[in-house]
Amino acid sequence: MTALKEYQRLEASGLWRPEPDAQRREVVVSLGDASLTISEFSGRPLAHWSLAAVRRANKGQTPAIYHPDGDPGETLELPDDETTMIEAIERLLRAIDRRRPRPGKLRVVLLSAVAATVLAGAVFWLPGALLEHTRQVVPAVKRDEIGEALLARITRISGQPCMTEEARLPLRHLAQRVLGDARRNDLVVLPDGVRDTAHLPGGLILMNRALIEDYEDPDTAAGYLLAESLRARASDPLGDLLAHSGLWATLKLLTTGALPDATLDAYAETLLTEAREPVPTDTLLRAFAAAELRSTPYAFARDVTGESTVALIEADPRAVEGSRPVLSDPDWLRLQAICGG
């Protein structure tokens, strides 16, 4: 059976030369499943050529001359009148060639796959990894500088931070009571701009004056301050800034130690306009209990009806005994006049 199904048996006559200096001999060529058999007319085989290793030495010319791959000295010449055999061999050689591995094509495929992997890493892995690395290596003093730079931009809109000489100590006492001794200077009261509270890299917490001026006791302001500290603790403020600002700003900070002015301007605007994620109620309740603060005043300040904050009201951890004092009455009155009102 031949390698081409339409032929039961395919033979032709040709001239075979085993080596360059040898006499050409007239032979019978048989096309098999995987080889060419070269025989004497008596039937004695002289050579077997694997079809996968057959090459044509004079493509498109006649008579057709073939040789084994790597040995052009051994040749088989098929005359013009053996067109059936020549066409059959050529068809088989084309089919075999299509199935050969393509080193160049494989190289392109492999290089493309590597390039795609690198690109995917650059797009999906690099920004996150770079942000995390930058967040970890930026020192506290640089975080403070970034926070102050953001505050300077925010105060262009909100007005300068409120402060009177009489309110300076009460403000520190409020921060100390809620945030701890080490953070007694981290609370800033603004006359406008910020909705209620916001936080900055370096630990600063901003508070709208209304939270101090509009309530009878300091528990509400303390509750907002506590909630904002939890929000800042849940995600690194510098990480939030870098995530908002993107890869270029992160690279700039990592390589030069500074953020572009446009980045700080854009983020300052975001802090003043975008709604923030609420702190989970169970987290709030645990924090109010630890701080010995009533959660009810904060709950009603967020929603005067109490409908959306009912869990903070019903599960108030200090509903019976009340809050551990936040400020004395004289200090609270002095603090309420911090903006001169």
Image: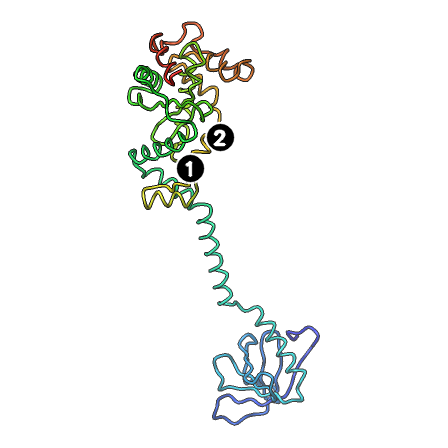
Side of 76 relative to 177 (left or right): right
Q: Which quarter of the figure is the C terminus placed in?
A: top left
Q: Residues within 10 Å of mark 2 (few under 14, many from 20)?
A: few
Q: Residues within 10 Å of mark 1 (few under 14, many from 20)?
A: some
**Residue 292 spot, x, y in % from top left:** 38, 12
**Residue 313 spot, x, y in % from top left:** 49, 12
Residue 42 shows in the view: no
Q: How is the image coloured?
A: rainbow
Amino acid identity at mark 2? Thr
**Residue 77 spot, x, y in % from top left:** 58, 88
The residue at the point 45 percent across, 7 percent down is 319
Vertical arrangement, residue 263 with respect to residue 46, above or below = above
Amino acid identity at mark 1? Asp
Quarter-of-image position of residue 127:
top left
Quarter-of-image position of residue 209:
top left
Q: Which quarter of the figure is the N terminus placed in?
A: bottom right
Q: Which residue is mark 2?
A: 273
**Residue 66 spot, x, y in % from top left:** 56, 84
The residue at the point 50 percent across, 18 percent down is 302
Question: For the residue labelled by badge 2, is the local secondary structure a helix, a strand or a loop?
Answer: helix
Residue 173 shows in the view: yes
Vertical arrangement, residue 201 with respect to residue 211, above or below = below
Q: Which residue is mark 1?
A: 265
| Nearer to us in this view, 72 or 60 | 60
Vertical arrangement, residue 211 with respect to residue 328, above or below = below
Structural distance between the alpha carbons of marks 2 and 1: 13 Å
